[in-house]
Every structure is written in structure tokens, then in C-alpha cells.
Amino acid sequence: MLLAYALFKIDGVEDVFFGSDFITVGKSQAVEWDSIKDDITQTIEYHGSGPYVVEEMKPACDDINSDAGASKAEKQIVHLLDQRVRPAVAQDGGDIIFHSFKDGIVYLEMYGACSGCPSSTATLKMGIENMLKHYVPEVKRVEPV
């Protein structure tokens, strides 16, 4: 059984996020960590030495750079996200993926620890938005999806 499926079989596990060298597990509010943490740890230890648990994903920039319809600004945005933002948020157990760019607004999807994180709005507005505006003049603001 693959690790992701095994983790989701644990009562109370709501989401699982795999980074390049970490796993983030989210739980429902109805369940206490103390009641599921041993099951989660044992499941990861048991399945962790096996084959890959998910298909290897390409960086978002590979998809958009191969898209002939993508604008130069979109390619710049995705490149900056892949090179400067995603590695930093991955260290905190999350990920941010480019969704779209329309009318000067960059729409981003947040995953793992970034999804629902209280500081994610500040990260989007103060960090990512300011950086993208600096390097890509067409960007007016950043919004979560």
C-alpha cells in the first residue's frame, strides 16, 4: 500500500502534503494529535523505506514554459515562484503554485502548511506580491485561489 493511502486510512487525517524531503499531515479539529500521532509516525516509518509514494511532479515552470500560449509575464512569474518562493515555503511544510494571471492579478494556490496558515496572507501580500511587482511590472496584486 502506498504511504498516502495508508495515512488517509488513519481516522482524523484530513490532508497529506509531500515535499521533496518532508511530509506534512493535517488532522480534523475533532481529533487530538495525541490520539493519532503514534499511528502516523508508525505508518511513515513502515512505508517510508518503500518505493515512491507519489508520482514525481514537474516544477510548475516546466508546464507553463512549454505552453506556447503563456505570456512572457506568466513565464517570469512562474520562474520567480519556482526559484525564490517555493523552496522557502517548502521549508515550513507548504507549497505555493501558480494558478493564473489575469488583468494584472496573480492567482496562487496554497498547499500543505500554507493552506489556512494565519501568516499566509502576510506572506502573499508583503513578500510574494512585492517581489513580483518589482520584477514583473505587469503585476498589480497577488490573490489566493
Image (tube, rainbow, N blue to C red):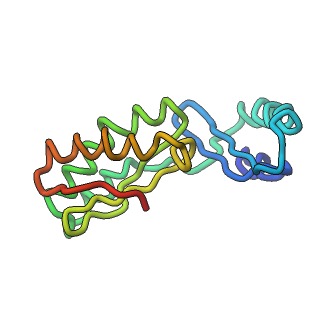
**Residue 140 in the figure: left or right of residue 109:** left
Relative to 34, does residue 109 appear above or below in the rendering?
below
Horizontal and vertical percent for residue 41?
Answer: 79, 31
Instruction: Give the x, y percent position of residue 131.
Output: 22, 40
Residue 26 falls in image quadrant:
top right
- Of residue 15 and residue 54, the one placed in the foreground of this image is 15
Residue 93 appears at what percent x and percent y? 55, 36
Q: Residue furthest right?
A: 35
Relative horizontal placement of residue 19, taking residue 41 as reference (left or right): left
**Residue at the (56%, 49%) spot, across then down:** 116
Residue 43 in percent (x, y) is at: 81, 37
Point 28% across, 58% down: residue = 106
Q: Quadrant of the C terminus?
A: bottom left
Using the image, determine if residue 31 lies above or below residue 33: below
| 65 and 77: which is toward the camera | 77
At x 81%, y 33%, the residue is 46
Left or right: where 65 falls relative to 124: left
Residue at the image position 21 percent from the left and 65 percent from the top: 70
